[in-house]
C-alpha cells in the first residue's frame, strides 16, 4: 500500500512538472524546445549499419554536374545553359582532402510574380549508370552549411531511378533534410519504399527562397562522404501493425475506453504494468477481431481508471510508457498554441524568424494596405483567409470554455486569437471582398518597391465571408466584457458579411448551404435577426433535400450521406483540404436554438441519419475505427483509384482514403468527420459516437498501423515534418497518412515532403475544434 501511494505521489509530481514546463514557455511566448529523444530522426541517426558502400569521397568532380530548374505545378523545368557554382574545396572537409562546395545566391533578380512561390531550384547531381542499389535502404551524406544569419536551413535530396522515381506528381523520391549551421550534419534519406534498381542520379537541391533581412543573400554548402547504407527499416505500408502494439501515445482519459491494437495473434492474454516498477495491474484475455482491414488482437483495459504511467505487454512486445489521467489531452492544447505562435506572420518569433513579409500588400482606394499578420498557412509561408478565420473562431471558443476553470489558459487562447482577429480586420474591403489566398514560399526584404514584393488582390468569396461571420461572433462573445467597443465592431462586421453575402448568392450546393446554416445560426444567437432565422431554416430545408434517406441497394446498405446537390447522384466528398467541416454542424445548432420549432424532428432525424452513416463507415476499419472517406461513383478520370476501393455495386465503390492527385493526407478528413459527430452527439447522447471520435484522435497520436505519433513533439516515433522555412515546431500536425499511387491502403513513407508531412494550420485548427467538441464543451 505504501509503495502504491509513493508511486501515485511521484506521478502527481511528474505530471505537475511537465505541465508547468509547457505552460512556462507557452504562456511566456517562448517557442517550445525540441526534445528529440523520442523522435524518428533520433532512431534514424542511431541505427546499426548492417552494410555500407562509400559511393563518392568527393575527391574529384568526375560524374558531378550542376543544373538549374524552374519550379512549376508538379514539375520542374530545366533552364538551359544556366551556371551553377560548385568546386572542390579544402576549407571544410569531413574526411580525405576535399569536399564539394556549392555556392548560390538565395534568389534571382527576376520579379516575384503573384502566383510564384520561390525562384529556382539549384541542383548538384551525382550521376550513375542505371545502377542497382536495391540491397541498400538509405542514402547518407555529410553536409556543412555556411549560411551567415540564416536561422533555419534545409536541402532537398532527390533520388532518380529509371522513369519511375520521382513519380509523376514529384512527391516520391524527394526528402527534406534540416541542417544546423556551421557544423557537419549527418544526413540520411531512408529509401526502402522506393524503387532503386536503375539509379540514374542522387541530387542535393537548394531552393532559392530568399533570405531574412539580417541573413546573407549568398549561401554555401560543403558536401562530403556520399554513401549507401543498409539498416533495419520502419514499417511504412499496410493496415497491419507489423507485429508491433499500436496505442495512443498521448495516453487515455481515465473515464474513456482504452484499447491498443496488434497484428500479433495466438497468445490469449495481455498484461498491463505500472511504470516504472513493472507491477502487474491487469491480466486479461485479448479480443480477436477479423474484418476488411485484417486480423488483429485488441487489448482492452478500459476498467483501469487510476491516474498513473503504464505499459502493455503482449507476447514478446512491450509498449513505451503512457499516461492514464483525468485530462490527458490538455498538453496537446498547449503544444498546438505553441505551433500557432511559431507560425505567426509579421511578428518576431525568437529563434524562428524576424518580423516578416512587410512587403506583402494590396491597394484599396489608392491606399496601400500591408497584409502581414495572422498565421502562415503551412510548411510554406502562404496565407489563407478561411484558415485564419477558422483558427481565430476556434481559439476564442476554447477561451470561453476555459474562462472559469482555467483562466490562464483562457487568456492565452485569447491572446493568440487576437493575433488572427487583427489580421481579419485589416483584410476587409469594399463589398465584402477579402484577400482570400496568397502564395508565399519565400523570405523577403520587407521593403516595398523592389522585385521580391507580393502584391495581392481582394475578391469576393462566399466561403471566406461565412467563416468571417463565425470568427467575428466568437470574438464578440468573449470580448463583450473585456473590450465592449471591439466586441461591437466584431458583431457589426459579422452582420455586414452575412448580408453582403446574401445579396450575391442563391445556394443550391451542399457546401454553400451547410456553411450558410452554420454561420447563420452563430449570427442569430447573438443578433436575434428574424431575417437570419428565416434564411437558415430555408437553407436547412434545401440541405436536407440533398440527403439519402433510405438504405442503398449496396453490399453495405448505407444511407444518411449527402449528395453534391438535390439533383445529383454524386456523393459529397472532400479531399485533403476539407473546407466544409461537416454538413450537419448547422442542423445541430438549429436543434439547440429552436427546440420547439415545427421542423425540429426533421433536423434531428437528418442529424441521426448522418451519424448512423458515419458509425457504419467507421466499423469497416475495425479495430482502428478510422472513418473511411466516401463512396465514389464511377464515370470520371478518377476511376482507376475508385476501383481500388470496395465495390458496393457495379457503379459505386467505398474508399478508405480520398481519391486524390499530388496533394495527399487524411488527417483533415477524419478530424472533420469527428467534429461533426461530436457536435451531433450533443443532441444524440450516443456513447458509441464518443468512442469513434476518440479513435480519430488516437489514430493521429499513434494508434495507427505504424505506431507513430503524427504530432511533432508528442508521444513516440514522430517524424520530422515539412516546415522547412521554420524548422520542426512542437505541436505541428501534418496533412497526414496517405496512400501510394492509386492504392487504398495506409502509406506513411519515411521521406519528409509536402503535402503529406507538411504542417498545416488547417489540421491544427481541426484538432482544437475536435477537442473542444468532445471534451471541453
Image (spheres, helix red, strand yellow):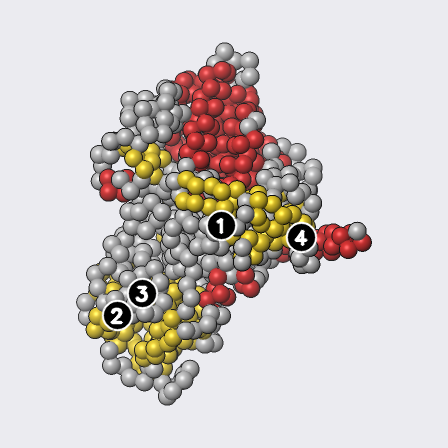
Q: CA distance from mark 4 to mark 1?
A: 21 Å
Q: CA distance from mark 2 to mark 1?
A: 39 Å
| In this view, 39 is above or below 693 | below
Residue name at image x 42 percent, y 57 percent = 235
Q: Position of residue 704 (x, y in %)?
A: 47, 48
Q: Which residue is mark 1?
A: 266
Please name which of the two marks, 2 or 1, marks the residue nearer to the observer: 1
Residue name at image x 56 percent, y 57 percent = 318
Element carrying mark 3:
strand
Q: Is residue 150 visible?
A: no
| Outermost residue to the top | 598
Q: Which residue is mark 4?
A: 280
Q: CA distance from mark 1 to mark 3?
A: 43 Å
| Outermost residue to the right | 2
The first of marks 4 and 3 along the sequence is 3
Residue name at image x 38 percent, y 50 percent = 238
Q: Are marks 4 and 1 in contact (CB under 8 Å)?
A: no
Q: Position of residue 183 (x, y in %)?
A: 47, 76
Amino acid at each position: 500500500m505504501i509503495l502504491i501511494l509513493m508511486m501515485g505521489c511521484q506521478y502527481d509530481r511528474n505530471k505537475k512538472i511537465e505541465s508547468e514546463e509547457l505552460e512556462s514557455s507557452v504562456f511566456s511566448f517562448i517557442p517550445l524546445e525540441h526534445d528529440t529523444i523520442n523522435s524518428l530522426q533520433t532512431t534514424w541517426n542511431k541505427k546499426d549499419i548492417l552494410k555500407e558502400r562509400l559511393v563518392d569521397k568527393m575527391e574529384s568532380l568526375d560524374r558531378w554536374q550542376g543544373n538549374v530548374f524552374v519550379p512549376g505545378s508538379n514539375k520542374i523545368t530545366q533552364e538551359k545553359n544556366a551556371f551553377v557554382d560548385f568546386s572542390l574545396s579544402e576549407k571544410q572537409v569531413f574526411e580525405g582532402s576535399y569536399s564539394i562546395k556549392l555556392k548560390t545566391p538565395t534568389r534571382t533578380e527576376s520579379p516575384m510574380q503573384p502566383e510564384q512561390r520561390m525562384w529556382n531550384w539549384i541542383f548538384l547531381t551525382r550521376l550513375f549508370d542505371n545502377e542497382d542499389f536495391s540491397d541498400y535502404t538509405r542514402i547518407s551524406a555529410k553536409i556543412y552549411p555556411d549560411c551567415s544569419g540564416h536561422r533555419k536551413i534545409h536541402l532537398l535530396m532527390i533520388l532518380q531511378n529509371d522513369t519511375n522515381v520521382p513519380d509523376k506528381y514529384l512527391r516520391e523520391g524527394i526528402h527534406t533534410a534540416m541542417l544546423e549551421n556551421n557544423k557537419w550534419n549527418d544526413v540520411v534519406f531512408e529509401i526502402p519504399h522506393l524503387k532503386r534498381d536503375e539509379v540514374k542520379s542522387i541530387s542535393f537541391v537548394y531552393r532559392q527562397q530568399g533570405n531574412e533581412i539580417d541573413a546573407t543573400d549568398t549561401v554555401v554548402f560543403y558536401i562530403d562522404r556520399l554513401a549507401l547504407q543498409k539498416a533495419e527499416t520502419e514499417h511504412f505500408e499496410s493496415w497491419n501493425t507489423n507485429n508491433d502494439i499500436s496505442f495512443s501515445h498521448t495516453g487515455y482519459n481515465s473515464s474513456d475506453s482504452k484499447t491498443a491494437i496488434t497484428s500479433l495473434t495466438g497468445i490469449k492474454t495481455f498484461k498491463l504494468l505500472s511504470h516504472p516498477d513493472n507491477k502487474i495491474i491487469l491480466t486479461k484475455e485479448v479480443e480477436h477481431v477479423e474484418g476488411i482491414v485484417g486480423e488483429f488482437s485488441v487489448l482492452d483495459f478500459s476498467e483501469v481508471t487510476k491516474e498513473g504511467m503504464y505499459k502493455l505487454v503482449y507476447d514478446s512486445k512491450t509498449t513505451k510508457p503512457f499516461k492514464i489521467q483525468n485530462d490527458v489531452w490538455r498538453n496537446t492544447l498547449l503544444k498546438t498554441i505553441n505551433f500557432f505562435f511559431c507560425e505567426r506572420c509579421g511578428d518576431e518569433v525568437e529563434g524562428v524568424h524576424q518580423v516578416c513579409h512587410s512587403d506583402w500588400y494590396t491597394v484599396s482606394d489608392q491606399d496601400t494596405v500591408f497584409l502581414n499578420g495572422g498565421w502562415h498557412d503551412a510548411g510554406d509561408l502562404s496565407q489563407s483567409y478561411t484558415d485564419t478565420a477558422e483558427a481565430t473562431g476556434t481559439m476564442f471558443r476554447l477561451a470561453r470554455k476555459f474562462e472559469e476553470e482555467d483562466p490562464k489558459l483562457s487568456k492565452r487562447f485569447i491572446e493568440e486569437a487576437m493575433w488572427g482577429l487583427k489580421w481579419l480586420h485589416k483584410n476587409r474591403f469594399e463589398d465584402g471582398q477579402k484577400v482570400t489566398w496568397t502564395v508565399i514560399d519565400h523570405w523577403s526584404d520587407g521593403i516595398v518597391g523592389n522585385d521580391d514584393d507580393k502584391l495581392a488582390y481582394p475578391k469576393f468569396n462566399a466561403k471566406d465571408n461565412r467563416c468571417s461571420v463565425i470568427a467575428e461572433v466568437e470574438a464578440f462573445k468573449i470580448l463583450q466584457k473585456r473590450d465592449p467597443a471591439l466586441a461591437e465592431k466584431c458583431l457589426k462586421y459579422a452582420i455586414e458579411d452575412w448580408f453582403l453575402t446574401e445579396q450575391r448568392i442563391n445556394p443550391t450546393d451542399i457546401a454553400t448551404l451547410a456553411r450558410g446554416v452554420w454561420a447563420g445560426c452563430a449570427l442569430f444567437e447573438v443578433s436575434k435577426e428574424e431575417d437570419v432565422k428565416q434564411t437558415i431554416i430555408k437553407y436547412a430545408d434545401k440541405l436536407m433535400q440533398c440527403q439519402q434517406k433510405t438504405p442503398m441497394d449496396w453490399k453495405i446498405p448505407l444511407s444518411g450521406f449527402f449528395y453534391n446537390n438535390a439533383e445529383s447522384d454524386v456523393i459529397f466528398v472532400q479531399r485533403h483540404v476539407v473546407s466544409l467541416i461537416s454538413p450537419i454542424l448547422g442542423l445541430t445548432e438549429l436543434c439547440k436554438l429552436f427546440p420547439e420549432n415545427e421542423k425540429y424532428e426533421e433536423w434531428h432525424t437528418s442529424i441521426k441519419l448522418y451519424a448512423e452513416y458515419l458509425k457504419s463507415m467507421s466499423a469497416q476499419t475495425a479495430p482502428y475505427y478510422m472513418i473511411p472517406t466516401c463512396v465514389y461513383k464511377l464515370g470520371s478520370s478518377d476511376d482507376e483509384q475508385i476501383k481500388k476501393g470496395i465495390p458496393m455495386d457495379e457503379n459505386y465503390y467505398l474508399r478508405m482514403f480520398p481519391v486524390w492527385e499530388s496533394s495527399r493526407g487524411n488527417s483533415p478528413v477524419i478530424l472533420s468527420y469527428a467534429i461533426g459527430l461530436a457536435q451531433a452527439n450533443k443532441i444524440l447522447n450516443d456513447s458509441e459516437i464518443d468512442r469513434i471520435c476518440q479513435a480519430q484522435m488516437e489514430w493521429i497520436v499513434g494508434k495507427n498501423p505504424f505506431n507513430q505519433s503524427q504530432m511533432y513533439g508528442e508521444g513516440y516515433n514522430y517524424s520530422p515534418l515539412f516546415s522547412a522555412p521554420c524548422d520542426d515546431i512542437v505541436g505541428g500536425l501534418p496533412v497526414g497518412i496517405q496512400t501510394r499511387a492509386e492504392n487504398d491502403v495506409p502509406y506513411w513513407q519515411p521521406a519528409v515532403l509536402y503535402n503529406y508531412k507538411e504542417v498545416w494550420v488547417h489540421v491544427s485548427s481541426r484538432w482544437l475544434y475536435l477537442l473542444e467538441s468532445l471534451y471541453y464543451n
